[in-house]
Image (cartoon, grey):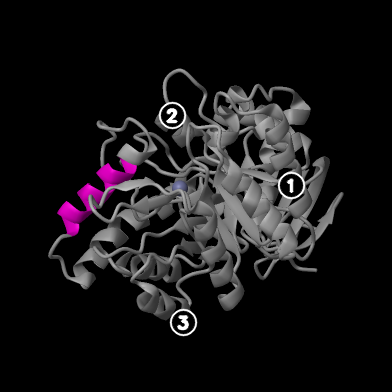
Amino acid sequence: MKYDVVIANGTLFLSYGEMGKRDIGVKDGRIVAVEDRLEKSDADIVINASDKVVVPGFVDSHIHMDKAFSADADCCCGLLDACNHSKQELTAYYQGWSSEDIISDMMENIEKVVQQCIVNGTSAVRTNVAVNPVVRTAGLQAVNRIREKYKEKIDILVTADCPTGMEKEWEDALRHGWIDFIGGYPNLKEDARTHRICYDDRKLRNAEYIFALSEKYKLPVDLHCDESDEPDFTLFRYICEQTWRRQMEGEVTVSHITALGARGAEEEAVADAIAWCAKAGVHVTTLTGQNLFLMPEDRRGTTRVKQLRDAGVRVAIASDNVRDAFCPFGNYDLMEEALLTAQVHKLGTDRELLDIMNMITYFPAASCKLEAYGLLPGCAANLVILDADYVPEALRSQAKKSYVMHLGKIVAKNGKIV
Ligand SMILES: [Zn+2]
């Protein structure tokens, strides 16, 4: 067979671990062969991957493209402060703008995000997009225009919540195909009197509403859940149980659940909630960098990654807020987030680091419901060639991304977009 590209002699990262020294043949955007040795003389491009690791393209399953690079985090003293600060900034900034002006302003930022993701080896992102009375659906339109523009270079998926009073516009956006996942913040509400964001004690009812939307529109669910410093994770437990009762295994993702790691959390209750999560096949996303930054100084602020993994829960690591009111750090570099997560949770053995690599590849791919993902014949040729000879070393040394390939085309090389 004549291949478009042959990646020769690389160490491959498969979901269960490494496979040493194989050739990958790529044709028409797909991986068509993985063998000890492939015929290379006819191939258009041959990449020598000896002493390199080949991993499937990274999947950043929880970001906020429409907020990125928007503000400093000067006044952040926790989640609610950040929410209110972000809301005020957005209102002040976009007040009186036309929808088209908001869209083009947002597109500039979103394009910057997307380029940074591509350079860092990310082949798919799932972004939350805010729908609210200030920007209405401008964010959705901006993201979708960029999605179309970059469709040959990266897959962009969209999560959006349906705020009260905006049901009609949200439904229109659904019909346009601008939304792929039902989002939501069931723990939070806007106070009717002060208009400030605060915690909502009707969180279970809010979750009910989100499940009803999911059922009505036949879309999977991707939620912010129990992102607090109080040891109350009843929402998490409830969502897991509901997922199981509604037979929605694999259709629900919850992010944050920092409450699981809060001081005072009862071990028995934690174990029970995690067992439900595993049983129901609920995906979890941990947002290490952002959670560390937003939580109080006297605690760690992340969820229980190790315990979730020990129970068999598929945990993804994602970038979340990057350089906005919620967090002044981040580079849309999942290798960086992965190393930070490994350090914080003391996951340092080779075996544990292989699992960490799963958390930025196969696990988020499952949460995002990506099809034909991986390095086997038939998969989309979305991959990264890392300058290290085995996966744990690639993470420890933050190996250079020599090549980033999307649908069989080289889209970035040595940190530059091609
Ligand atoms: Zn988020």
Give me the disc on residue 276: 1
Seen at 65% across and 34% down, the residue is 305
Residue 4 is situated, as x and y percent measured from the top left of the image, at: 67, 64
Q: Residues within 10 Å of mark 1 (few under 14, many from 20)?
A: many
**Identity, as a three-letter code, of the amino acid under mark 3:** Arg
Q: Helix or strand or loop: what does disc 3 sit on?
A: helix
Q: Residues within 10 Å of mark 2 (few under 14, many from 20)?
A: many
Residue 94 is situated, as x and y percent measured from the top left of the image, at: 18, 59
Left or right of 87 on screen, residue 402: right
| Residue at the limit of the structure toward the left, as seen here | 96
Give me the disc on residue 175: 3
Seen at 48% across and 31% down, the residue is 229
Q: Earlier in the sequence, mark 2 or mark 3?
A: 3
Q: Does the magenta run of residues contain 271?
A: no
State which region is magenta: 82-94
Q: Residues within 10 Å of mark 3 (few under 14, many from 20)?
A: few
Q: Helix or strand or loop: what does disc 1 sit on?
A: helix
Task: Name the residue nearer the viewer: 17 or 271.
Answer: 271
Establish if 66 lies above or below 315.
below
The quarter of the picture where residue 358 lies is top right
Whether residue 391 can be seen here:
no
Seen at 30% across and 52% down, the residue is 191
Q: Main secondary structure of the magenta part?
A: helix
**Identity, as a three-letter code, of the amino acid under mark 2:** Met
Whether residue 262 can be seen here:
yes
Q: Earlier in the sequence, mark 3 or mark 1?
A: 3
Q: Nearer the viewer, mark 3 or mark 1?
A: 1
Give me the disc on residue 295: 2
Dots 2, 3 in contact, CB < 8 A: no
Q: CA distance from mark 3 to mark 1?
A: 34 Å
Residue 112 is situated, as x and y percent measured from the top left of the image, at: 35, 52
